[in-house]
């Protein structure tokens, strides 16, 4: 992932003057916050993202040094007021799990989580870490409370074309208030689980809870809970998936236009990709 000074500005708090200057430089007469996603598509995704590896002449054994003095600051987590800004700005970019759930009584919820990742492909397992709530009396965010109650959830993948609506679901809405409606997003019925999928998303993982693991701090307080869900059914927009007939489906990355999370309010888009084969594997073979 390469951070571009204009494309990777904070999408939730865009500096309109800087963005307008970038837009003019790209040959666009005017740009508003609402047209940001469209501008990103035109500026970066209308052409292929593939470039050469950064060091094509590298040979095994050659040293690749960082471009900074080799001096480090050792940071003891126990000595910090908070490790939150460090962790979210250092472990980057992070994929975003856009999770939809139902409560036991059928109330819907939709929220994004960047503490997430895939942990297995056989079976396909996705993990989402949900930080404890300081607002709700039970200490659980609505997503966790709903998963605990039903054992089901859907992970939707966020793309540039609906980032503003998805970001709006981050707000602390009262329990029982459905973020689908607040953000103007569209429900699509799932096939196996009860929570709906997000129609604006190009990929959905219908998940059933496999395991949950509470994380406690040194004081014994639960600070987050990791839920592991098996993807029992996966939906991909026909336009972005290849190899279905061969039984080895693969998503076209340039068409998906996924988002990543950095520190603070900053999102990331991918503006360049390159192939670099493992020593024992062909670059074109997955």
Image (spheres, rainbow, N blue to C red):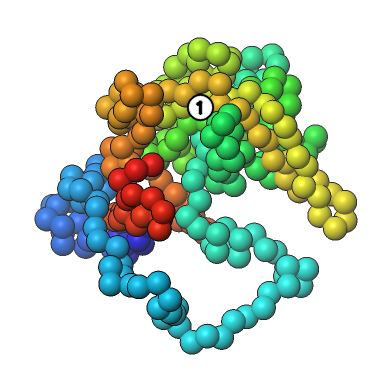
- CA neighbours of label 1 inside 10 A, class few (<14), some (14 to 19), many (20+): many
**Residue 171 seen anywhere in this rendered image of the structure:** no
Q: Say whether residue 205 is visible.
A: yes
**Furthest residue in direction front, as rendered:** 280
Looking at the image, residue 195 sits to the left or right of residue 62; the answer is right
Please give the name of the residue rendered at 45% of the width and 35% of the height, measured from the top-left corner.
Answer: 157
87 vs 29: above or below: below
Please state which of residues 113 and 37 is positioned toward the viewer in this rendering.
Answer: 113
Q: Is residue 6 above or below residue 192?
A: below
Position of residue 97 measured from the top left corner of the image (x, y, whole percent): 52, 38
The quadrant in which residue 105 appears is top right
Residue 148, given in percent of the width and then of the height, sits at 73, 26
Query: Which residue lies at the image location 36% right of the left edge and 33% below the top edge?
Result: 250
Task: Name the side, left or right, on which 23 lies relative to 191.
Answer: left
Left or right: residue 260 compared with residue 49: right
SS class, disc 1: strand
- Residue 208 lies, in percent from the top left, at 63, 23
Q: Quadrant of the C terminus?
A: top left
Of the pair 259 and 170, the residue shown nearer to us: 259
Tell me the residue at 32%/20% (across/down).
245
Quadrant of the image containing the N terminus: bottom left
Q: Quadrant of the rendered structure where residue 26 is?
A: bottom left
Give residue 159's position: percent from left, percent from top. 37, 39
Q: Is residue 182 left or right of residue 146?
A: left
At x 55%, y 13%, the residue is 192
Circle 1 residue: 205
The answer to whether residue 123 is above or below residue 65 is above
Front-most of residues 117 and 187:
117
Judge by depth and name the residue closer to the eye, 85 or 181. 85
């Amino acid at each position: 992932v390469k951070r571009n000074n204009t494309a990777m500005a904070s999408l939730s708090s865009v500096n309109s003057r800087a963005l307008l200057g970038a837009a003019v430089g790209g040959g666009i007469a005017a740009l508003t916050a609402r047209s940001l996603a469209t501008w990103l598509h035109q500026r970066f995704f209308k052409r292929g993202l593939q470039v050469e590896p950064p060091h094509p002449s590298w040979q095994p054994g050659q040293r690749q040094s960082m471009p900074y003095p080799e001096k480090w600051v050792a940071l003891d987590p126990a000595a910090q007021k908070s490790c939150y800004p460090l962790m979210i700005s250092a472990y980057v970019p992070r994929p975003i799990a856009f999770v939809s759930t139902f409560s036991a009584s059928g109330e819907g919820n939709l929220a994004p989580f960047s503490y997430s990742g895939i942990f297995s492909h056989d079976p396909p397992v996705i993990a989402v870490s949900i930080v404890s709530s300081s607002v709700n009396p039970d200490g659980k965010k609505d997503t966790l409370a709903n998963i605990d109650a039903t054992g089901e959830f859907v992970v939707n993948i966020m793309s540039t074309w609906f980032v503003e609506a998805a970001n709006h679901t981050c707000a602390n809405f009262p329990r029982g208030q459905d973020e689908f409606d607040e953000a103007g997003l569209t429900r699509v019925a799932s096939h196996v689980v009860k929570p709906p999928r997000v129609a604006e998303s190009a990929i959905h993982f219908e998940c059933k809870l496999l395991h949950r693991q509470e994380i406690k701090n040194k004081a014994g307080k639960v600070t987050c809970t990791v839920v592991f869900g098996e993807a029992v059914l996966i939906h991909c927009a026909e336009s972005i998936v290849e190899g279905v007939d061969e039984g080895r489906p693969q998503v076209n990355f340039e068409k998906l236009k996924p988002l990543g999370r950095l520190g603070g309010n900053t999102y990331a888009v991918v503006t360049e990709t390159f192939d670099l084969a493992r020593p024992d594997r062909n670059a074109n073979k997955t």
